[in-house]
Image (tube, rainbow, N blue to C red):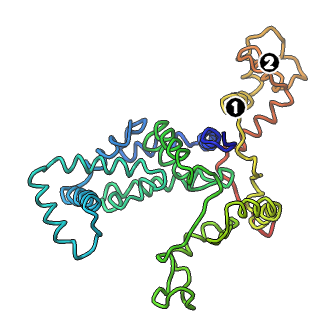
Amino acid sequence: MKKFSADYFEKKYRILFNKLFIKKGFLDDIKESRKKLGLPENGFNNEADLACFVISKMNAEERRSIAFGVFIEDYARKNNLTLEEENKERIINAYVGVIKKQGDSMMAKAIFWLSKNIEDHTQMITKNSNLRKNKFLSKLYPETIKLIRKFWALDLLDEHIMGHFVEKYLFFGDYGINQYINNKIACPNCRYIGVNHFSPTRASMAGQDEGAYGKNYIFNKQTVKLLSLHFNSVFLIIKPYATKEEVLQYVEDNWNNLKEHMTEKNSFYKQFDVHPNKIKESDFERNQLVYELYKLSKKELLKIYKGGKDFSVSGIYKEMIVSAILNEQYKIDISPDAIKKSATRFAKDTNTKKKMKDIGDI
């Protein structure tokens, strides 16, 4: 069994979502956004429900457009056709014939197609071009990106994963998170956190008319923009004639240097204690309980405490009362000294307002 199995990564993803979920105001803001956008109070039950919601907000022309797009994709695949001008008339004639025979069933196919697109773990739901052309549906993306920008920070690691977490939870609640994680870990290319690969194609290059190795055969603007998102990463360049064994040996021989580059090149991560073991298992419910009790005053804690000890005398700190409450009412054994540390650590993890230092100040 692989050390880094699907089960291993499932735990990591769930830890990361919990880190997002406990951020102050996250759940309240999600509920507020659902109400603002006219979404169900607890999100949709599944992808088909959301697809039906999306279709219901479209006008007749937009519905025909999406149905035609679905037909083109399906027809071209079944008949091994390329989507070029020479095949345009054939495809349109076929579509007209199908519409006459099938009518409304085309919309059912469109809903199914849209459901599968919504389920995609690599693309954001709200960035679907069919949604962003519609006056009402175009509001979904700004509201989603507002939530993402508010709650993502370096301590949550990969902004792409966090973006999907926010969006999936906004639209589906726990169901969306479970589906996203299941789809991610089922894909060997996508399950790794902090590791991926990029292989440029001809479409990634400018100066194509000059051919390979021409002086202007360089990355085009879209590719530069894509790679620039990973300025805080280290790229591993693998030539086609390298073997798997050589690549693995290279990483093993040079790991210290690679890790040094990754640590030193982006000092921003140091501010939030981001390191290889950052995604650790933690008892979020227990830590939250400690935090909620620690926030209370000594007077309020004495009202909660039901044990026989007298904590009302002077010289008794509230950590001692919290420790007793946890032990006697919840069977949680944690020392008074550890109470404050645990509560402070949890408070830090829930904070969304993290001011980044200038790189020159670190």
Residue 353 pos. (x, y %): 66, 52
Query: Residue drawn 81% across and 36% down?
Result: 341
Foreground residue, 281 or 273? 281
Foreground residue, 79 or 75? 79
Q: Is residue 2 above or below residue 125?
A: above
Foreground residue, 161 or 41? 161
Query: Residue drawn 20% across and 58% down?
Result: 64
Q: Is residue 311 visible?
A: yes
Q: Are marks 2 and 1 in contact (CB under 8 Å)?
A: no
Quadrant assignment for the N terminus: top right
Q: Amino acid at mark 1?
A: Asp
Q: Amino acid at mark 2?
A: Ala
Find disc 2 in the rendering and name its residue: 324
Query: Residue drawn 18% across and 47% down?
Result: 105
Q: Quadrant of residue 293?
A: top right
Is residue 103 found left or right of 13 in the rendered image? left
Of all residues shown, which one is farthest toward the right? 315
Is residue 250 found left or right of 317 in the rendered image? left
Find disc 1 in the rendering and name its residue: 283
Q: Is residue 67 above or below residue 212?
A: above
Foreground residue, 261 or 30? 261
Residue 282 pos. (x, y %): 71, 35
Residue 218 pos. (x, y %): 56, 83
**Count of numbered labels shown in the rendering:** 2
Instruction: Identify the mark nearer the N-term, 2 or 1.
Output: 1
